[in-house]
Amino acid sequence: MLGHAFLGFFERNFSALSTQDQEKLLKSAVLVIGCGGLGGYVLEILARIGVGRLIFADGDRFEQTNLNRQILATTENLGKNKAKVAKHRIEKIAPYCKPMALEYFIGPSDISKYARSVELIVDAVDGVETKVQLIKQCQGAMIPVVTGAVAGFEGFVSSVLPSGKSPIDFFCGRNGEGAENLLGTPAPTVSMIGTLQAYEAISYICWGRFYLENKVCYISLRNFSFDILKL
């Protein structure tokens, strides 16, 4: 049962979440790969909702171009490692959470290592080729992954089970040549896609289901349209 010390933190989660749901979150662990645009919003939401253990990896450092969309990016954090900044942020807003910062770019061996200790992985990496490789690595490690991408005022989210269908055909081009680089990554789309990725993780932890298993949620903020496409 939840102790009195924790109830104050989660009072505004009830009754959207039950006490049983909150306990599941506190006992859960999630690996977030990438602590920039999408990853920053995912970590913020999962920490505040009550996920008990967050592992996150990023070997990159904040730079001025990140300020338009990355919630962890501030003028004071420029030049600092993104995972290290994320850990400091989580410690300040979620004292019940155990954050673990991996201050490097995660590789296949890390996926296999941490897949055994988390419920799922959230893909928040940059680069088309990198995302495709990550999804394949997660499926090989038999761990669910929630992926997402942004291109201008459009983006999508999909959840991939080890034996499920994957949206890798949506990723076209090479790292540095994808739609996200050509069309930009404005804050409204980044925060929307990150929020949906976080909710897919919450749904899986609390109720054992992904809404976007074998599906893609395609969003166009320019047209204010939300479409669910079957894979």
Image (cartoon, rainbow, N blue to C red):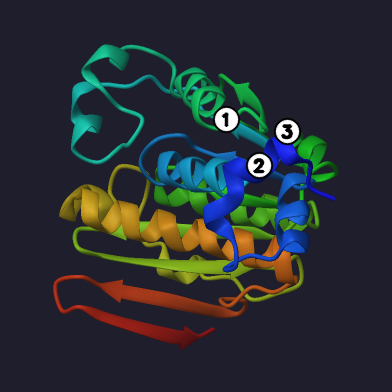
Looking at the rendered structure, the secondary structure element under dot 3 is: helix
- Residue type at mark 1 is Ala
Residue drawn at x 42%, y 57% as measured from the top left: 195
Say which of marks 3 and 2 sits in front: 2
Callout 1 touching callout 3 (CB < 8 Å): yes
Q: Position of residue 202 (x, y in %)?
A: 62, 60
Q: Which mark is residue 225?
A: none
Up the image or down, 213 lies above or below 128; here it is below
- Left-right relation of 45 to 69: right
Say which quadrant the C terminus sits in: bottom right
- Left-right relation of 62 to 222: right
Q: Name the one closer to the observer, 171 or 61.
A: 61
| Residue 185 visible (yes or no) | no
Density class for disc 2 (Cα within 10 Å; few <14, some 14-19, many ≥20) is: many
Up the image or down, 88 lies above or below 228; here it is above
| Residue 163 visible (yes or no) | yes
Residue drawn at x 53%, y 80% as measured from the top left: 215
- Left-right relation of 177 to 32: left
**Residue hosting label 2:** 31
**Residue hosting label 1:** 57
- Residue type at mark 2 is Leu
**Residue hosting label 3:** 110
Task: Name, please, the residue furthest toward the front.
Answer: 4
Q: Earlier in the sequence, mark 3 or mark 2?
A: 2
Density class for disc 3 (Cα within 10 Å; few <14, some 14-19, many ≥20) is: few
Q: Name the one closer to the observer, 77 or 128.
A: 77
Up the image or down, 35 lies above or below 119; here it is above
CA–CA distance in space, label 1 to label 3: 10 Å
Up the image or down, 43 lies above or below 208; here it is above
CA–CA distance in space, label 1 to label 2: 8 Å
Q: Position of residue 106 (x, y in %)?
A: 61, 31
Q: Position of residue 228 (x, y in %)?
A: 43, 85
